[in-house]
Image: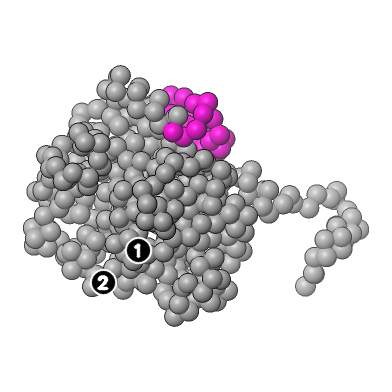
């Protein structure tokens, strides 16, 4: 790869050749892909993008793939960025955009990482890919791998929502439901991957996956015509997504596509917030229990905490914790003001943004992007709990009028 120099350990600084089957450093640290920005500047210009397909692969010069590696079959990326004027007014913000990544093929941002995993697995000559996941990474891997003709073994905690498990089964994955926490699930997947030599899609083990996730940041900047917002809010679980987002923004700054960097807003569930707690206390992160209905970010032992904490601090960003009640309120708020249906973990960034605005921690003249990382259809049970059941009546106008009256529904 002409555009890549090496992979470097964020813990000890050791450098590795950027082979397709990289995992962690021997010291246990996570690797970071290092690019040759001077070279990239000579071959990649904003004008080049006008001739390219609207997907994550339009930024190939900033991605760690060989020039002849084909893009996987599913179209991942270029999700819509909606200007949310009504919601901005409700929150007291000058400008607000919602990046709806729930429209990706398997309905989450994780498709970006899984598409990269499929591309690198092909480069490695692998036929089987495996991972552990609370749900979204699993379904995205199963779908992207199925389209590419690769076999998958997926490990999920037994609490994973049925909608996500249904996706896995539909895509033909071999699914192992682990009776325990996400940490238990991760450990079993790690042992199985080592035993059978499967390609490892676990995002905090495989350094290429954050490179796929970073394309959400590249898109946001291009969709805003390279005008940098003041803040970008996103939900945080194991730390891979916020770390990837920050890496993409720094890449664009390094090659001169943007002239400054935004501040990140790290939103975690109050019942599981080890990364935010470490940033706020200045102490090393400590494991936490996974007490939140936002299953996709219920990660008590974050595997990419170092990169995530560094990203929040480097950006001069903010941390915020939200309760499950605040998360579900944000789900309704997004749906009713923007027409965007996000799952609990997917709307946690918006829940955090709302809370920060209420606390006066975001200036009223700020321009903000909030990323919705997953679609609400992945967890309809909690959506129904938050919004209630529909009105049920027989085909009788009098009964309908009575139902309207009981619920004090205004008729216009």
Q: Nearer the viewer, residue 246 or 89?
A: 246
Tell me the tag on residue 260: 2
Q: Position of residue 261 (x, y in %)?
A: 28, 68
* Residue 162 location, quadrant: top right
Q: Position of residue 86 (x, y in %)?
A: 55, 73
Q: Which quadrant holds the C terminus?
A: bottom right
Say which residue label 1 marks: 220
Point 53% across, 77% down: residue: 92
Label 1 environment density (alpha carbons within 10 Å; few <14, some 14–19, many ≥20): many
Q: Position of residue 193 (x, y in %)?
A: 32, 25
Q: Nearer the viewer, residue 50 or 126?
A: 126
Q: Position of residue 197 (x, y in %)?
A: 27, 22
For the question of whether residue 328 can be seen, the reply is: no
Tell me the element at label 2: loop
Q: Left or right? Give the position of 89 relative to 6.
A: right
For the question of whether residue 317 can be seen, the reply is: yes
Q: Left or right? Give the position of 234 relative to 41.
A: right
Q: Which sits earlier in the primary sequence, circle 2 or circle 1? A: 1
Q: Residue most toward the right?
A: 398
Q: Which quadrant holds the N terminus?
A: top left
Tell me the tag on residue 294: none
Label 2 environment density (alpha carbons within 10 Å; few <14, some 14–19, many ≥20): some
Point 60% across, 63% down: residue: 333
* Residue 336 location, quadrant: bottom right
- In the rendered image, residue 258 lying in the magenta stretch gets the answer no
**Magenta residue span:** 155-183
Tell me the element at label 1: helix
Q: Residue most toward the top?
A: 195
Give the Cα distance between marks 2 and 1: 14 Å
């Amino acid at each position: 790869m002409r555009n890549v120099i090496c992979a470097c350990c964020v813990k000890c600084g050791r450098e590795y050749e950027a082979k397709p089957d990289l995992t962690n450093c021997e010291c246990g640290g996570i690797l970071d892909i290092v690019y040759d920005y001077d070279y990239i500047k000579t071959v990649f210009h904003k004008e080049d993008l006008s001739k390219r397909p609207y997907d994550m692969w339009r930024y190939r010069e900033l991605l760690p793939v060989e020039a002849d590696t084909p893009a996987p079959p599913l179209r991942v990326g270029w999700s819509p960025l909606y200007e949310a004027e009504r919601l901005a007014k409700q929150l007291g913000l000058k400008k607000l955009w919602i990046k709806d990544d729930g429209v990706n093929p398997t309905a989450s941002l994780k498709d970006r990482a899984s598409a990269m995993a499929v591309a690198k697995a092909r480069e490695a000559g692998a036929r089987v890919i495996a991972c552990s996941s609370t749900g979204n990474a699993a379904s995205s891997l199963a779908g992207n791998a199925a389209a590419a003709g690769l076999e998958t073994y997926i490990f999920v905690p037994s609490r994973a929502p049925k909608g996500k498990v249904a996706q896995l089964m539909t895509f033909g994955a071999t699914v192992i439901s682990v009776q325990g926490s996400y940490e238990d699930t991760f450990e079993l997947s790690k042992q199985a991957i080592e035993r059978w030599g499967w390609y490892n899609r676990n995002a905090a083990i495989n350094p290429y996956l954050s490179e796929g996730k970073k394309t959400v940041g590249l898109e946001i900047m291009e969709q805003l015509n390279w005008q940098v917002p003041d803040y970008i809010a996103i939900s945080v679980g194991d730390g891979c997504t916020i770390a990837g987002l920050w890496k993409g923004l720094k890449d664009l700054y390094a090659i001169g596509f943007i002239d400054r960097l935004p501040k990140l807003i790290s939103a975690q569930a109050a019942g599981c917030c080890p990364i935010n707690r470490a940033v706020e206390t200045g102490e090393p992160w400590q494991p936490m229990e996974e007490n939140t209905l936002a299953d996709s970010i219920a990660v008590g032992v974050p595997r990419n905490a170092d990169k995530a904490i560094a990203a929040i601090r480097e950006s001069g960003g903010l941390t915020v914790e939200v309760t499950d009640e605040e998360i579900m309120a944000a789900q309704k708020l997004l749906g009713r003001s923007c027409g965007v249906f996000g799952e609990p973990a997917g709307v946690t960034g918006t829940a955090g943004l709302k809370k920060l605005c209420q606390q006066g921690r975001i200036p009223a003249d700020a321009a903000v992007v909030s990323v919705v990382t997953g679609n609400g259809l992945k967890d309809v049970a909690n959506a129904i709990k938050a919004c209630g059941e529909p009105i049920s009546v027989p085909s009788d106008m009098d009964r309908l009028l009575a139902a309207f009256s009981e619920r004090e529904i205004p008729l216009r």
